[in-house]
Amino acid sequence: MNETATPSVYPLQLEGALDPPLSRWLWLVKWLLAIPHFFLLFFLWIAFVLLTVVAFFAILFTGRYPRGIFDFNVGVMRWSWRVGFYTYSALGTDRYPPFTLAEAPDYPARLAVAYPQSLSRGLVLVKWWLLAIPQYLIVSVFAGGAWAGWGAANDHMSWSSGGGLIDLLVFISAVVLLFTGRYPRQIFDFVMGMNRWVLRVVAYAALMTDKYPPFRLDMGEDEPATETSPADVVGPDPAPGLS
């Protein structure tokens, strides 16, 4: 066994390209500019939770995640990630996010999830609560109490608020940006790694994959390189499917 082999890519693929030049002051009002998105996402996440319940029973009885529900839920996560990247999950761009569930290839924040051809009927009973408990404890540090509440009660706006380490480091970056006009690159890479970890756990908790999220911080704009073959992916960038 080659212990130095490149780690395989997780079914959820998260990317975000730092998009300079960034305004020194725009971050102060992005919460206001993003209110229309927050309003729509509130209802989209309610639909996400309800449809995940439907998917739970579909997986339990058929071993398959209904493709239409899967595409919708990935779209909600994708939209949320674009808004989070624009606002306070990263502050990585000043380009206003599009109002769409579909992929926007020219936007600097992208998310895709490999569609699973089959899922374990038994695992669906325990993975989203019992098996995911260690992950919830970790990502609650990254994203704060609001995300932990999502895992426990399936509330909305999971990783975009909560006073965790992501919020702290993004705030530090915003202050540096305000006074220097530059976003600290090392902080950005670290924030991307935490967001990537959080959203992998979201996908696992939402029953989109049986592959357990790795205890690994993959930092930087892009997913780690892999030799795995592409598969059927909801999004423009192929990702490996589930065996």
Image (cartoon, grey):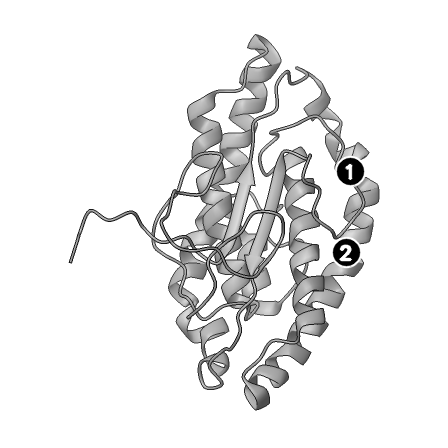
Location of residue 113 with respect to 116 vertically, above or below: above
- Label 2 residue SS: helix
Read off the residue under disc 2: 42
Q: Furthest residue to the top?
A: 180
Lower sequence index among marks 2 and 1:
1
Amino acid type for the residue under numbered disc 2:
Phe
Residue 2: tell me if it is visible.
Answer: yes
User: Within the image, what quadrant is residue 177 found in?
Assistant: top right
Read off the residue under disc 1: 34
Q: Please state the horizontal and vertical placement of residue 9, each as a whole percent of the image.
A: 41, 52
Amino acid type for the residue under numbered disc 1:
Ala
Q: Calculate the distance from the C-alpha at mark 2 to the C-alpha at mark 1.
A: 12 Å
Residue, x 40% and y 54% (percent of image)? 138
- Label 1 residue SS: loop
- Of residues 178 and 16, the one nearer the viewer is 16
- Of residues 12 and 176, the one nearer the viewer is 12
Q: In this view, does 211 lie to the left or right of 161?
A: left
- Of residues 105 and 65, the one nearer the viewer is 105
Q: Please state the horizontal and vertical placement of residue 197, each as a whole percent of the image.
A: 45, 50
Callout 2 crowding tier (Cα within 10 Å): few <14, some 14–19, many ≥20: some
Callout 1 crowding tier (Cα within 10 Å): few <14, some 14–19, many ≥20: some
User: Within the image, what quadrant is residue 167 found in?
Assistant: top right
Location of residue 237 with respect to 32 vertically, above or below: below
Residue, x 54% and y 84% (percent of image)? 63
Location of residue 145 with respect to 128 vertically, above or below: above
Disc on res. 132: none
Q: Please state the horizontal and vertical placement of residue 26, each as a whole percent of the image.
A: 72, 21
Quadrant location, the C terminus: bottom left
Q: Furthest residue to the front?
A: 229
